[in-house]
Image (cartoon, rainbow, N blue to C red):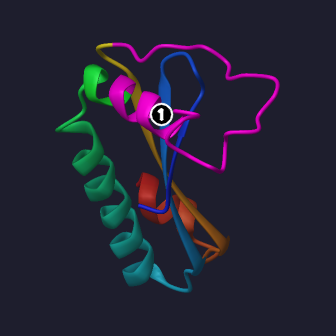
Amino acid sequence: MDFILFDKRETFLCLVLKNMIKSRKPLLSAFCQTLHRTNLFVDPYNSEKMRKARKDCFNKLGSYRIRDIENGLIEFDFLEKSRVIPILAARDFTKTAESEVSG
């Protein structure tokens, strides 16, 4: 997975980036990879661990990179059960990509 994005409410986006997907086989392979990587995030998901990771990452005393942030951090919480959406993104897809995946 390349990025995990969070809307500060209830939804995670598990984003896999590809450069070009030129035919059916690479498309299906990338689609399966996206679903697999998303499941690797979903299966061990634990809201308490997410809270701890957020606290550790944004601890001003433990990081010189955020020590000088003046405006403070936006407060939010992680839900026990969140929506997780897999997303496959590419600079260029095969022309038949939509029909290959949906039907």
Q: Quadrant of the N terminus?
A: bottom left
Q: Quadrant of residue 49?
A: top left
> Of helix, strand and loop, which one carries label 1?
strand
Q: Quadrant of residue 51?
A: top left
Residue at the (40%, 71%) spot, across then down? 30
Side of 16 relative to 48 (left or right): right
**Badge 1 amino acid:** Phe
Q: Position of residue 23 (x, y in %)?
A: 50, 84
Name the foreground residue: 54 vs 41.
54
Q: Which residues are magenta?
A: 51-79
Query: Image height check: is 88 above or below 65?
Result: below
Q: Is residue 78 left or right of residue 69?
A: left
Name the chief secondary structure element in magenta. Answer: loop
Could you say which is closer to the camera, residue 16 or residue 47?
A: 47
Quarter in which the C terminus is drawn: bottom left
> Residue 9 is drawn in which quadrant?
top right
Q: Residue at x 45, y 65 (%)?
A: 100
Near-viewer residue (56 or 90): 56
User: Compared with residue 67, is residue 74 higher up or lower down, i.e. above or below?
Assistant: above
- Residue highlighted by disc 1: 12
- Judge left or right: residue 96 versus residue 68: left
Between 94 and 66, which is closer to the camera in this rendering?
66
Residue 55 highlighted magenta (yes or no):
yes
Magenta-colored stretch includes residue 6:
no
- Vertical comparison of 23 with 99: above or below: below
Q: Position of residue 58 (x, y in %)?
A: 54, 34
* Residue at image point 48% right, 40% down: 57
Q: Residues within 10 Å of mark 1 (few under 14, many from 20)?
A: some
